[in-house]
Image (cartoon, rainbow, N blue to C red):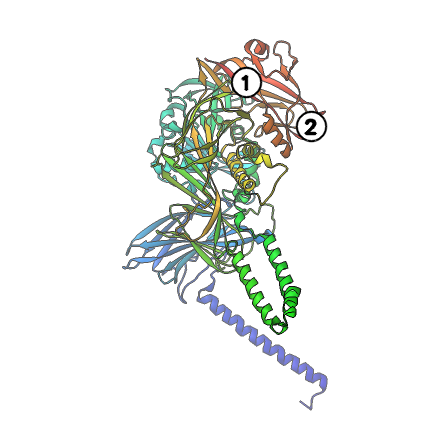
Amino acid sequence: MRIFPRNMKRALKGSLFGLLLAAAMTVQAFGADIQAMDGMTDMTADGTGAGQYGEPGQGTDGTGELTDAPVTLDVVYGYKNIAKSGRFLPLHMELGNRTDQVFKGTLCVLAMESDMQGYSMDMDYDVYRYEYPVEIPAMGSLTQMRSVSLGNRVDQMYIRLLDESGKEVTRKRLKLNLNKDTAELFIGVLSDNPEKLLYMGGAGINYSTLRTRSIEMTAASLPSSELGLDQLDVLLITDFDTGSLSGQQVTAVWEWVQKGGVLLIGTGGRGEETLRAFAGEILEQPVPQPDQYVINMGVEYAVDGPEGASIPLTCTEVWLKGGSEVLASDELSVISSVSVGKGMVAVSMYDFVDIEGFCQDNISYIDHLFTSLLGENRINSLSSGMDGSTSSLYWSVQSLINTGNLSKIPKVGLYVTLAIAYVVLAGPGLYFFMKHRGMLRYYQPSVAVLSLCCTGMVLLMGMTTRFTGPFFTYASIKDTDTDNVSETTFINMRAPYNKSYSVKLNPEYTLYPLTGNTYYSMSPIPKFTGEEEPSITIHYGDEDTGIRSDNVGAFNSKFFMLERHMENDKKEGFTGNINSFDGKVTGTLTNHYGQAVEDVAVLLYNQMIFVGHMDPGETVELDDLKTLYGATNFGYAMAEQITGASRYKEDKDIEDTAYVEALERTNLLSFYMGNYLTGYHSEARIVAFSKDKEETGFLRSSGYETYGTTLLTSSVDVNYEKDGMVYQSAMQKQPNVLSGEYYAQNNTMYGLTPVMLEYYLGNNIEVDKLDFYHLSDEVAESMRYYYTVPFSGKMYFYNYNTGNYDSMDTGVTEFDRDMLEPYLSPGNTLTVKYVYDSSGDYTWNIMLPVLAVTGRSK
């Protein structure tokens, strides 16, 4: 090298280094290619990268399944591979055993969920792993029907099959075909003539912000579990005998409706057959024989004249329990609906098969139909993608299960006292004590002994406040009727250490994870390869349901919902004979629980009767109990009257056990009212609270700390008739808004702009009297904390004789037939104009009165 100039030496050295680096990179790339060819990754034709995991030399079918694996795996997701994210996704999995030995193993599904991380509340994604034990006969097959939560905006899942030793046998990667550009309304269609209902698909709803997609179903393909229906928004049953459905399928449909689904039933000439499975739950009277009617579909669809949209149809006129009119034709209620939990059942007089031709010529009728049926709030929720089955619950249950046992709060005063005492004793106290006795040589050993004693005292004081393992905070709703008990329990699972832990739950409960929604987060979804370590593993065994938590963090929450349905063998619950007429509630109520219950109350649509404490088997008279008027859609204001939380408006002490208990009960009761009593309901809901604070029924074994609240509920039918007269709410059908800003869900007007509403009083009665019910003073006072005040100002009735609005005395709350005569239309409607007086206690939200009508049946 000495014979070369210095610059040339540097050049040669650089070139030699470059050659060596290039050679190393070439060898590495060649090795990577060999590794890829040996089975690490096999890109599909569309570049999605379906995984191939097996021994070298094994081939795949392009989706990740090994073509020569001993067990085959075939998967269909959703409804014929149609799906929505943010819902539970049905998976139909076919497993085939190619060997002559029984295969025993575990079927694993890996899904990714959006979630909040710790107390920082940063949005992130966690991998959830669901495990199902399987046993496939020799040379046989096995069908697995499972529903797994699919996170918002997540479009893939991984399915693995492991043998008994935990070795992977085969896998599939599901790349889901999701419509991320247009919000869709999934309509399941159950009919003997589905080809005549094709017009239901592809229609635009609410200015095409929502697009319908019809999904054909049969009696064989209709899921037998509520989770299997979770992808649907509407289930349409028409021209079909529901008696052909199994008991499990009928139960699944009803549970799905209670969770928020919409069941739409068409009757027509087969009304009795179509309603057969649900008649006992929704019908007030037996199904009559069908007849011929001329139905006015709406003047907007008339071409040659006002009567051009009237078509003759075979119809069955039905009467629902507490039904509200959705669409009308003159004096006929063409479609009526009734609230069932969070959902709705609607029944039409006609068969949807029979209006095929009309809808093909007038496709906007589908828009009109579903806009009227679903309402603005539900349509907005569907359009925005905020209607996930569990993500919407994630936020609403926070106040229920983010609390804890007050006895676990350390007594700060005791620790401060101990610390001061230690400083005084270990410092000047012990020093001067030893000095006066000439024992200073023992000072340091004495301080050490005193330190050990104080440390022991601290440990002893913390025995009752220290968590030693996983612990649970829960909120449970137990609903009972004559035959069945339905229990819904929300749990917050935490551990005091930052390491893996596992718990075992009662397998009688169906377990769902509750995770946060990322709708408002536009951050990219992290890459999901299927090789990530799961944060939560749920194992569904025969003896128990196991949950394993990894890398979650100390005291970080994981939320779950558990559901259990049982026969009411013990005949628990509340029963009664309840009458409601002219604003007065009478009758009796009996407690059939084997325990004393507290804060018992009877809830009607806009009335509440507080009962209080009831012993086991006790019967109380309702006649002389006070009635409060409010609105169940403002659940918190009503709930705090029942639990007593309204007494703590000014004096809120977190260390006051009575206050904390009242707050916990108020949160749970308002959650129940807001989720299960959202619309008009004709039955009475009885609510009460159990005194038990340490429920462990959802756990497979004892030894875990639990703390929470249990709400007990029952439904009791109410009689609204007396001496041949009928008493009913004019709010069964939402008022028609003629002008102004009115929110039917809360029965409130907004701001100072006058509101004109057209109330439908019902064509089934001859109106004898009309009552206006305002908020009770107690409820009105509570509502002020939520920026809502009762209406005060001027009220006008529209006079059909003069065409003018007549001023009415707002102090008058009862109007008889003679007073109403000039204000009632031929269709029994009343138009009222409200003008709010801003001189009083002004706020943006003004609660309007609730109208109730008394009359004789036609």
Residue 158: image x %, image y %? 45, 55
Residue at image mark 2? 841
> What mark, if any, has residue 254 been given in the picture?
none
State the image coordinates of residue 488 (x, y, percent, origin top left): 45, 41
**Residue furthest out toward the front:** 437
Can residue 303 be seen in the rendering of this structure?
no
Q: Which residue is mark 1?
A: 304
Mark found first going from the N terminus, 2 or 1: 1
Quadrant of the drawing holding the C terminus: top left
Q: Secondary structure at mark 1?
A: loop
Cα separation, mark 2 vs mark 1, equals 53 Å
Q: Report the amino acid beneath label 2.
A: Asp
Give the residue displayed 53% in from the left and 56% down from the top: 461
What is the count of numbered marks?
A: 2
Q: Residues within 10 Å of mark 2 (few under 14, many from 20)?
A: few
The image shows residue 806 at horizontal and vertical percentages of 65, 13
Amino acid on which the number 1 mark rests in the picture: Asp
Observer-nearest of 131 and 791 = 791
Mark 1 Cα-neighbour bin, 10 Å: few <14, some 14–19, many ≥20: few
